[in-house]
């Protein structure tokens, strides 16, 4: 067969094949989303979320991370303060930090307070763990985070502590790892802070599941609005991290403006 009729037949066949492929992909995506949106048993889901967190703790190794902090005021898109910090972790529960670079000012004091809080929380991770001792859970549907189908759960603290959040969490439906947390502290970190809203992102780093990005929007009673953004920019997992507890305590300089003490 040749000529116009052959070309017409070939074009029609290719169109049918293309439509079949597109329709098949659409069906697969729809099935995936439908599966993700099905209401799971909340008790079983919470159990798997807790197991995933415990597994992450077991997989933890010594590492050093370079983290970038930027502190913005309400009147500018340019940061008032930029800080580059080196955070060292030694399993199971020891952290220390050094400030490598800083533009100074109140923003650096705020970053030091945040890092002090992170070190304290590392000593007793159960205080911040997303489990049924710290939170009540409610299923909130399905969603997507980092391109992954997720379960969305609303978490409400069982205790009024600044370490806990009234928040929404996005949980990978395959690994049950938490990909994202967004919410507000159950208790204000300071009299000077009216409210704080935080967004925390997680990712896999060298086989470990770590908090890698944080954004916080804080409203102070007398200082207006501040926004703090942190991002992990480099990891060194190969070397053993030496931790000096005395040196870590020396970094603790508390500020009256305790912005986002729950962050990180």
Image: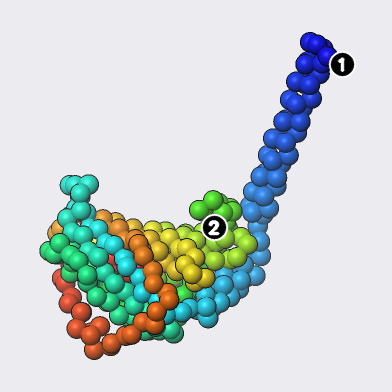
Determine whether 217 is above or below 75 in the image.
below
Provide residue 245's location: percent of width, then percent of height: 28, 88
Task: Give the vertical position of 100 relative to 184 (above or below).
Answer: below
Dividing the picture into quadrants, the one containing residue 263 is bottom left
Query: Which image quadrant for residue 104?
Result: bottom left
The earlier-in-sequence mark between 1 and 2 is 1
Residue found at x 45% / y 69%:
210
Q: Give the distance between the C-alpha atoms of the residues marked 1 and 2, in whole angstroms.
A: 57 Å
Which residue is drawn at the image coordinates 40% and 76% (left, top)? Answer: 63
Farthest residue to the top: give it: 4
Q: Nearer the viewer, mark 1 or mark 2?
A: 1
Residue at 73% in and 39% down: 24
> Quick check: can you spot residue 216?
no
Residue placed farthest to the right in the image?
1
In the displayed image of the protein, which residue is found farthest to the front?
Answer: 2
On the rendered structure, is 49 left or right of 60? Answer: right
Q: Is residue 93 left or right of residue 225?
A: right
The answer to which of 21 and 40 lies nearer the viewer is 21
- Location of residue 226 in the rendering, given as x and y in whole percent from the top left corner: 22, 56
Q: Where, quadrant-wise, is the C terminus in this rendering?
A: bottom left
Q: Can the viewer see residue 40?
A: yes
Check disc 1 and report its element: helix, strand or loop: loop
Which residue position is annotated with label 2? 152
Q: What is the crowding at mark 2: few (fewer than 14 residues within 10 Å), some, or many (at least 20)?
A: many
> Which corner quadrant of the image does residue 108 belong to?
bottom left
The one of 220 and 76 positioned closer to us in this rendering: 76
221 shown above or below 26:
below
Q: Secondary structure at mark 2?
A: strand
Q: Which residue is mark 1?
A: 1
């Amino acid at each position: 067969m040749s000529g116009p009729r052959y070309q017409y037949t070939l074009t029609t066949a290719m169109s049918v094949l293309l439509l079949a492929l597109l329709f098949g992909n659409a069906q697969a995506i729809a099935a995936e989303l439908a599966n993700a949106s099905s209401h799971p048993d909340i008790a079983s889901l919470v159990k798997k979320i807790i197991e995933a967190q415990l597994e992450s703790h077991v997989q933890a190794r010594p590492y050093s991370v370079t983290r970038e902090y930027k502190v913005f005021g309400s009147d500018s898109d340019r940061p008032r303060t930029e800080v580059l910090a080196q955070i060292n972790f030694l399993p199971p529960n020891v952290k220390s930090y050094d400030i490598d670079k800083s533009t100074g000012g109140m923003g650096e004091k705020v970053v030091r307070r945040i890092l002090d809080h992170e070190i304290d929380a590392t000593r007793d991770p159960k205080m911040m763990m997303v489990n049924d001792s710290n939170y009540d859970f409610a299923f909130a549907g399905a969603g997507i985070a980092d391109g992954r189908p997720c379960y969305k759960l609303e978490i409400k603290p069982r205790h009024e502590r600044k370490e806990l959040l009234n928040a929404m969490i996005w949980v990978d439906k395959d690994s049950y790892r938490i990909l994202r947390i967004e919410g507000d502290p159950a208790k204000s970190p300071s009299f000077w802070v009216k409210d704080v809203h935080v967004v925390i992102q997680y990712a896999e780093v060298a086989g470990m599941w770590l908090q890698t990005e944080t954004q916080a929007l804080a409203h102070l009673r007398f200082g207006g609005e501040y926004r703090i953004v942190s991002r992990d920019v480099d990891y060194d997992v190969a070397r053993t991290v030496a931790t000096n507890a005395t040196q870590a305590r020396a970094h603790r300089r508390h500020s009256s403006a305790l912005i986002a003490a729950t962050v990180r």
